Image (cartoon, rainbow, N blue to C red):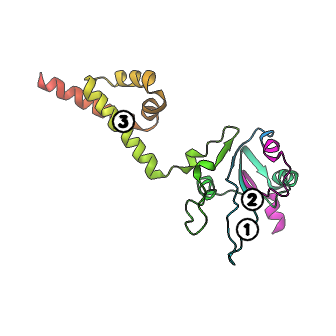
Amino acid sequence: MEKEKKERRSRKWTLVIYPDSAPENWRQVISNMHVAWIESPCHDKDKNPDNTVKKAHWHILLMFGSDKSFRQIKEIADELNAPIPQPCRNVVGMVRYFAHIDNPEKHQYKPSDIVGHCGADPQQYLETASQKKADRYKRIKDMMDFVDDQGITEFADLLRYARVKHFDDWFQSLCDDSAFVMGQYVKSVRYSAEKEK
């Protein structure tokens, strides 16, 4: 069983870092690997079952571009004086755990205190599916209002406008998941305008 655990490979690994045993420059040690990683707030208010305060610690999520073996990650853990690393099965669940978002019985840490390093963006993992869906519907509503207000009758005109004026929201939405509904809407607006003539 121990051999099987050590041969396990994963792209995502978690570590626990203790302030009293980690090297002073532990963040720099990780960042020098040039791997995207996420750091929890310092968990200094967690409680044991007997209500005593747990030893302060950080949870770390390392996100590699390719699979890494237990042995490779154990070398990193040893350099940081961290306990046995664990493969991460669910990035969204892990990042949310960093603030105990889904564990109301535990101390609630601020999601805004979760820090991304080397290009990692914790915010993308903190948004719920319902928030993402609501944002998508709001973008579609805004685009429909624009089509109505400006009398847009060609999808290409909407796409060009979005590319120039709303690249970070409308344009990406049209490219990723809203082109069909907006294309149909523009076509319907054009058809209605022609019918009225």
Q: Is 91 on the left or on the right of 134, as rendered?
A: right
The residue sitting at the bottom extreme is 50
Mark 3, residue position: 180
Q: Which mark is residue 54?
A: 1
Residue in the foreground of this view, choosing between 161 and 41? 41
Q: Quadrant of the N terminus?
A: bottom right
Q: Is 52 on the left or on the right of 102, as rendered?
A: right
Q: Is 130 on the left or on the right of 65, as rendered?
A: left
Q: Gap in Å between the C-alphas at discs 3 and 1?
A: 52 Å
Disc 3 is placed on an element classified as helix
Q: Which mark is residue 57?
A: 2
| Disc 2 to disc 1: CB gap under 8 Å | yes
Q: Nearer the viewer, mark 3 or mark 1?
A: 1
Q: Amino acid at mark 3?
A: Phe
Q: Amino acid at mark 1?
A: Lys
Q: Quadrant of the C terminus?
A: top left
Task: Decide whether residue 10 is among the magenta residues.
Answer: yes
